[in-house]
Amino acid sequence: MRVKERVRWHLDHDYRNPIRDPLWSHIHLSDGLLAVVESVPFQQLGRIKQLGPAHLVYPGATHTRLAHSLGVYHIAHRMIRTLLSHDECPDLDLEAVVAYLCAALLHDLGHFPFTHSLKELPLDHHETLAARLIEQEPLASLIRDRVGVDPSFVAAIIDESIDDERDEVAFFRTLLSGALDPDKLDYLNRDAYFCGVPYGMQDIDFALSRIRPHSAHGIILEQSGISAVENVLFSKYLMYRAVYWHRNVRVATAMIKTGLYTALAEGLIPLDSLYGLTDETFYNGFASRDGRPFELIRRVHDRQLHIAVADAEYIESEPHHARLSDLAYRRGVEDRVRSLIAGTTGRAPDPEDVIIDVPEAVSFEVRFPVLSGDRIIDYPNAGTVFTPHVVGDFTRTLRRIRLMLSPAVADRCAQPQELIDAAIASN
């Protein structure tokens, strides 16, 4: 039996254990991958919400990283079957294919609550944490003995900081993380579905049908598939605008980030205390503690949110705006706002009552080889509406500097826009 035929036979016959999913109907697992799903480390993902505090705005957004991980695995399975249907698909070793499917299933294993909201804190990347867990017990033995692959192979596909010169690792990294990767194709659909918004829905069948393997580039996009990438990018923009960076989602995120940053800076918690938590243990461990930093976390838990009273455009070329990306510098600006409030109201707010929020940069740039006739060209030059200028406009439109005040302080401030304008003015 030829290599490709052996892989196809495996995919057709060895995945017989169904799990029902609201998006993709039945997701079929092999016996080995089912054992991984039933393990304690994977089940912990079922206790972490995919969208963090978004459920405070969209009550349906209680779906978990476990469900998302199954969805990513499902699309990865479909993607590899699609690529194998092309004659130009290289002979992929069976172990490499299974390692890729296992990596798709476990790609979010290193997540803890609010991971993506805490990028400004000096924390290990979730891919690094996932790789570490994969090479530890109990998963290492399950992957080696039940799934039948080397755990280090799976870890290397997920964590690109791992030096690995195997061609298969490079190929599967491009599949797992790219413009049309299984992660985006699942989370955009899943997040839209559970939030009850139409913006994120993707035509998975069409998207997968427009990619093909290529000996020099790993995978390429057919010219007719440009619209599939455009749909992903525009959906991503709308989901950021309406869901991920909704005003009150940003408020809740900023309150938690400020509380944790202050607790870390004051030595109240060690940095690694965030790793391995679930939503429940996060709130039980922090919201129940005494101290002003933990009061912010407790308020989020009880949905007693600050009010976003004013905002300003983030201008990347302005040095004083760029400095706001530094949390320590931002605390100084917040102190300046507190002084301004004290000057007009006669009373200075407490530190936790004033927060300035600056969303991190989000990219809509795509580097995807496109087959145009008999030439391979880069995606931005392939006739897409997502030119570098448009991509820059999308990013600029999303990023707003916001001033957030506790309700009691907001009631005392008559001109909040003047506060933020004065606080972030160049000096």
Image (cartoon, rainbow, N blue to C red):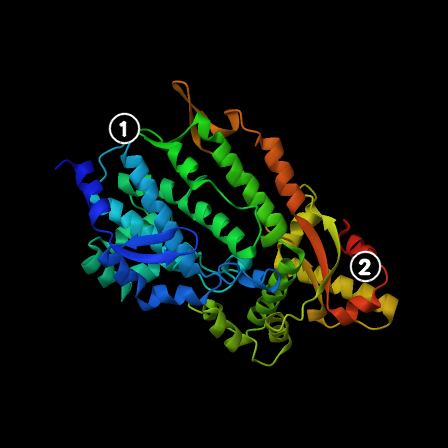
Q: Residue at x 43, y 41 (%)?
A: 204
Q: Is 179 above or below relative to 30?
A: above
Q: Which mark is residue 416?
A: 2
Q: Is 320 above or below relative to 1?
A: below
Instruction: Decide: few, some or many residues near mark 2? Use Cα within 10 Å; few <14, some 14-19, many ≥20.
Output: many
Disc 1 on helix, strand or loop? loop
State the image coordinates of residue 305 (x, y, percent, origin top left).
67, 67
Q: Amino acid at mark 1?
A: Glu
Q: Residue at x 35, y 56 (%)?
A: 106
> Is any part of residue 301 visible from this angle?
yes
- 191 relative position to 137: left or right: right
Q: Nearer the viewer, mark 2 or mark 1?
A: 1
- 80 relative position to 225: left or right: left
Q: Quadrant of the N terminus?
A: top left
- 346 relative position to 210: left or right: right
> Who comes first in sequence, dot 2 or dot 1?
1
Closer to the camera, 121 or 377? 377
State the image coordinates of residue 272 (x, y, percent, origin top left).
45, 68
- Residue 387 image-quadrant placement: top right
Q: Residue at x 63, y 48 (%)?
A: 241
Disc 2 on helix, strand or loop? helix
- Circle 1 sits on which residue? 88
Closer to the camera, 324 or 176? 176
- Residue 259 image-quadrant placement: bottom right
Q: Amino acid at mark 2?
A: Pro
State the image coordinates of residue 234 (x, y, percent, origin top left).
57, 40
| Cα distance between the residues tagged 2 and 1 | 61 Å
Closer to the camera, 6 or 171? 6
Closer to the camera, 384 or 272? 384
- Residue 395 image-quadrant placement: top right
Give the total number of marks visible in the rendering. Answer: 2
Instruction: Decide: few, some or many residues near mark 1? Use Cα within 10 Å; few <14, some 14-19, many ≥20.
Output: few
